[in-house]
Amino acid sequence: MKGSHLFRTLLILVLVVLAVVNLYPTFRGTQLEDILQAKLQRISDATGTPVNILREDIFRFDVDLAYRIRHQDGISDADKDELVDLVEELRTGFFEEFDRVSSKSIKLGLDLQGGMHLILEVSLVDLMDRLAKNTDATYEEISQAIRVILDEDPASEFDQVVMQQFSDHNIPMARYFGDPRQSDREIVRMLQQQAEEAVDLTLTKLRNRIDEFGVSEPSITRQGARRIVVELPGVQDPTRARNLIGRTALLEFQLVADAEITARVVRDLDNFLLESDGNVDLLTDDASTEEELVAEDAAGVVEDDGALATDSLADGEDITGTERLFGEDVEGIGDTASRFDASRPFSSLLSLFGRQMVVLKVDRDRVERILGRQEVQAVIPPDYEFLWGHSEQTDQQGRAFYYLFLLKERAELTGNELSDAQVTIGSGSADPTTAGQAIVTLTMKREGARLFARVTENNIGEQLAIVLDDKVHMAPNIRSRIPDGRAIIEGLDSVEEADDLAIVLRAGALPAPVNIIEERTVGPSLGKDSIQAGMLSAISGLLLVMIFMVIYYRGSGLIADIVLMLNIIFLMAVLAGFGFTLTLPGIAGIILTIGMAVDANVLIYERIREELRAGKTVWNAVRNGYDRALVTILDANITTMIAGIILYQFGTGPIRGFALTLMIGIAASVFTALVVSRAIFDYITAHWSVKKLSI
């Protein structure tokens, strides 16, 4: 008996110590968060930088806060030294401790600390278009019909819609997919398998991107056949997160067409448009007035385009700067009005210098509408395609324009050959304009390096375009063979853009585009209010239950209160120790657990009262009370546990959070009621000659 009591006592002590150890990081983390907030407020008051911006940048070591402070006007040198010392303090010992305790603290869900809730839909029609071969006008019509049906009814089965549309058009699917000997049903099964793999692969790649983005405890789950639900707690920059998640990141290296081919295609498009009745009139039927387009053009001013560089790639001879393209001596090209000429319906909208084409912003809409027409696409050679530069540009006079490229459609190399992408800061040794600018360094796999060496060796003097998501980031000339498979992407607007680009390149391209069909942003103030309301409810419920137990069961009620407190400590320690996420429904589960926790004690105490009324001694009454209440306690809690397991298994989001805390609370309450309270009663009856029990 003594051995049993000793073991039980040691078990309780060990569990209490473990609980305290697991909960300490959460307690310490709260203290450090308050300290951090106070110091950031001090920096904010002195520099005028909002606290939320400082909170994002303080632990980003690629952001030089000390440099910003030292070069900010209106602050004395003494204050600058103090603020710089404060930043260095936060980024050294404080950061190490803060990072350590944060990783072991209780994680808060989206509803408590704010963040983003997104529903994404994988575009299976775009995936089908990528898999199709020898597409024509009929295929485009079928593809568009499938897209419309799936948009109108998201619950439609992709494979059934595809088969039905091909059947309605009386077209065998083997014309565009698979082997000519395959039946429509076999091809549909192949497409369905590709679709399933695409959604699964998208889930994996999104997880990789979000993990590198640094979101704590993200939730990424599949919903239905082609939808994905993403929850990002604590995200402070929704736009950046949205761009990171929705980006396909299809990286391709494509050769730029020769100057002769480019000129011929432009000439052929002019001739085709002139020969086609009504096309010229259509081009001038713009939805916007000329004045509106001029205003838009004058308003848009964006920094220079990015450029790619390696040891053996240089800026193309035809892209020497906007001075050459938009020289002041060239009349008309810098005008903000459209340069459209009905006698040259396509070439008048652009300026052609060898391989290089530029289009004024005011004319881009017309050019896009020309190139987007199906009959115009038939004029362009099938192994070439037009692609735009990735961003709007401006010359020294503030004139807005876009680069337009004619590229060989077949990619010489893709992002699948990349092994790594890292962000560095340019030193400016090779090019002074890159000093202090963010650069993405690309490293290729062994096979990719071999292919890159062969491509550069066979195309010396040509331009190699770097295309990301059908946008050309740069098109430098190849000067010599590049054997090491390394390249760099320059000219990015910010370190954040470089970071995001490196993340998506490392994670790899999504197998199909994803569309954000629903987005909700939860502010952190809502989470703070929820936490305060939840804490108030929990504390109020806890106090009321404890008061009731003391009033109704007197001294034994006090033991029940001690057990109840241990129950809450164990529950929170399990959440912290196993890295579970606490949500608002989880707080509701804790509150429910508080009410249920004393249920076992009530059953035991009523049995003890019956035994005492029957004339049993205190020791026998306690022993019989626990033994006889055991079956009832287990029965009640096991059935509740089963319900919690079912909720957790089949529920989503908030339901799982509620079920999790409920199950942990049940296990903790059973242990504390049957083991901890029994140990306290045994200690009292064994060490004190108790003749009457306060119950």
Image: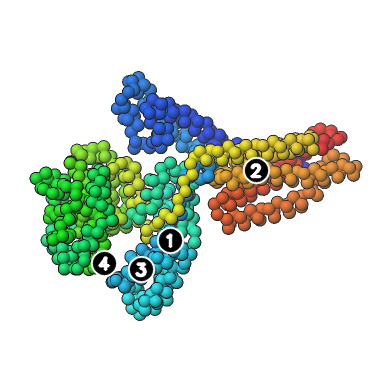
| Residue 462 appears in the picture as rendered | no
Instruction: Please determine whether, in this image, residue 289 is positioned above or below residue 140.
Output: above
Pick the quarter of the image with the N terminus.
top right
First in sequence: mark 2 vs mark 4? 4
Distance from disc 3 to disc 4, alpha carbons, whole Å, reads 14 Å
Residue at 40 percent of width and 32 percent of height: 50
Query: Where is mark 1, residue-wise?
Result: 199
First in sequence: mark 2 vs mark 1? 1
Q: Dot 4, how many residues are within 10 Å of its Cα: few (below 14), some (14-19), or many (20+)? A: few
Cβ atoms at labels 3 and 4 below 8 Å apart:
no
Q: In x, y percent, where is residue 466?
A: 24, 53
User: Which dot marks residue 591?
Assistant: 2
Q: Nearer the observer, disc 4 or disc 1?
A: 4
Query: Where is mark 4, residue-wise?
Result: 374
Q: Nearer the observer, disc 3 or disc 4?
A: 4
Pick the quarter of the image with the C terminus.
top right
Distance from disc 2 to disc 4, alpha carbons, whole Å, reads 63 Å
Kind of residue at badge 3? Ser
First in sequence: mark 3 vs mark 4? 3
Q: Nearer the observer, disc 2 or disc 4?
A: 4
Question: Is residue 379 toward the left or the right of residue 550 in the image?
Answer: left
Kind of residue at badge 4? Gln
Residue 686's quadrant in the figure? Answer: top right
